[in-house]
Amino acid sequence: MILIGIALVVLAILGAPLFAIIAAGALIGFAGSDIDLMVVPMEIFRVSEIPVLIAIPLFTFAGYLLGESQAPRRLVRVTNVLLGWMPGGLAVVALFVCALFTAFTGASGVTIIAMGALLYPAIAAAGYREQFNLGLITTSGSLGLLFAPSLPLILYGIIAEQSIDDLFVAGILPGLLMIFLLSLYCIREGGVVRSRLTRHPFDRREIVAALRESMWEIPLPIIVLGGVYSGFFAVSEAAAVTVVYVFIVEVLINRDIPLRRLPGVMRDSMILVGGILIILGVSLASTNYMIDEQVPMRLFEWVTSHISSKLSFLILLNVFLLMLGMMLDIFSALVIVVPLILPIAAGYGIDPIHLGIIFLANMQIGYCTPPVGMNLFIASYRFDKPIVLLYRAALPFLAILLLTVLIITYWPWLSLVLVR
C-alpha cells in the first residue's frame, strides 16, 4: 500500500487529474477489504441528493454573468464617488470591490484577472506607488472567501455537515476585520503620498448619476444576503433568486450580455462546477474508506501524543494550512483535508464552525504567500511583472492578514458571537 500511495503522489505531481487520483486511492483501498467497490459510485450518486448542492451551480453561473457584464465597472464608479474623496480612498474602493466580486465568483484568480484590468490602471493613474498597487490587487483577490455566498463556505458546510447559514453569518466579522485593517493601511499609504494623489471631490451630482447607473446591481447583495441572514431564504432559494435577478438585470435590462454569448458563459461556469462536484463525489468515497480504516482516529492519537495543548495545535494548524494554501487550490484542499482535521480539532474542543473560518482565512492568505502562492503567479502573468517584485509587493499586506488570522484563530468569539 505504501508503494501504491507513492505512485499516486508521483502521478499527481506529473499532472494526473486530482479526481482520478482520489478515486483510484479509494478503489484500491476498498479492493483490499471486504467492502463492495460499488460504494464508490454510490457515494458519487449521493452527492446529487444533497439538497443545498444546487446552490453551487446557481451561484457560480450568477458570478460568471456578473463578471462578463459591465457590473464591475459600475460598482467601481459608485464606490469611488462615495469614498474617492478620502486619503487612500481609491485603494479602499479596490478592497471592497474585489471582496464583493470574489464572494460571488468564489475564485480569487478570476478576480485578479477581471478586476485587475479595471483597477490597476485607475490606481496607478491616481498616483499610488507601483509596488503598493501590485500588492493591493494581488492580496485583495481572495478577500471575499469569508463572505456569503462564497462557494468555499458552501463546500465546507457540505463536507463538515455544518449549517451553511451559520457559516455565512460566522464569516461576517472576520471578513470585515480583514478589510478594516487593510483599509487603515491604505489610508496610511494615501497620507504618505498625499501630495501626488488624485482625489475625487465629493460631488452630489456624480453620486446621483453613479447610483442611477447602478440602480439594479446595488440591491443584489441586500436582497440575497439580507434574505439569507434573516432566514427568509434558504441557501438554495437565495441562489435561485440571485441567478434569476442577475439574468434579468444584465441580459434583459442592461443588455450587457447578448443572448448569443449566454451558451459560452454557461459552459465556462459549468466546467468549474463539474470539476468541483466530481472531486467532491470521489472524496466522499475516499473519506468513507479513511473512516473504515480509522485513519482520523489514528492521526488524532498521533497528534495528541506529540501536542499536548490546544494552543500548540492551533499554531501548527495555521502553519500547515498556509503551506497547503500555497500548493493546492481551495476546493481540492477542502475535500481532501477537512475530513482529516475535523475530528482532530473536535478532540481539542474547537467548534467546527470556527474551524471552517480558520481554514478559509488561512487558505486565502496561502494564495498570496511566497514563494509559490497561486495568486502571485497569476498577478505576475496578468501585469507582466517579475515574480520577485510581486513577493516584495505582497509582504506588507500579508503581515496585516497574518495578524487577522491570529486574531480569528485565538479569539473564537469573533466567529461565533453572531451564530450563538
Image (cartoon, rainbow, N blue to C red):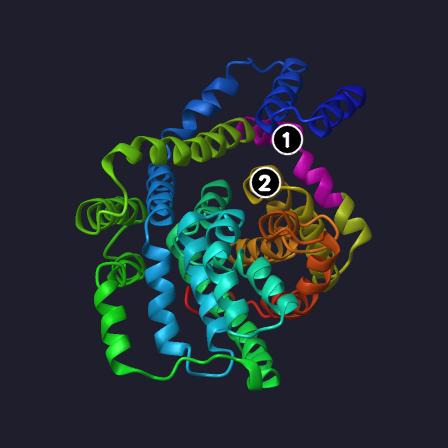
Q: Are marks 2 and 1 in contact (CB under 8 Å)?
A: yes
Examine the residues drawn in magenta and state their main secondary structure.
Answer: helix
Residue 306 x %, y %: 82, 51
Towards the viewer: 237 or 352: 237
Residue with the mark numbered 2: 339
Towards the viewer: 94 or 176: 94
- Residue type at mark 1 is Met
* Label 1: how many Cα within 10 Å (few below 14, some 14–19, many 20+): some
322 on left or right of 190: right
Q: Is residue 353 visible?
A: yes
At x 40%, y 61%, the residue is 169
- Residue type at mark 2 is Pro
At x 73%, y 55%, the residue is 319
What label does residue 290 carry, if any?
1
User: Distance from label 2 to label 1 (Cα)?
Assistant: 9 Å
Towards the viewer: 326 or 141: 141
Residue 44 x %, y %: 46, 24
> Outermost residue, left direction?
253
Residue 80 x %, y %: 39, 72
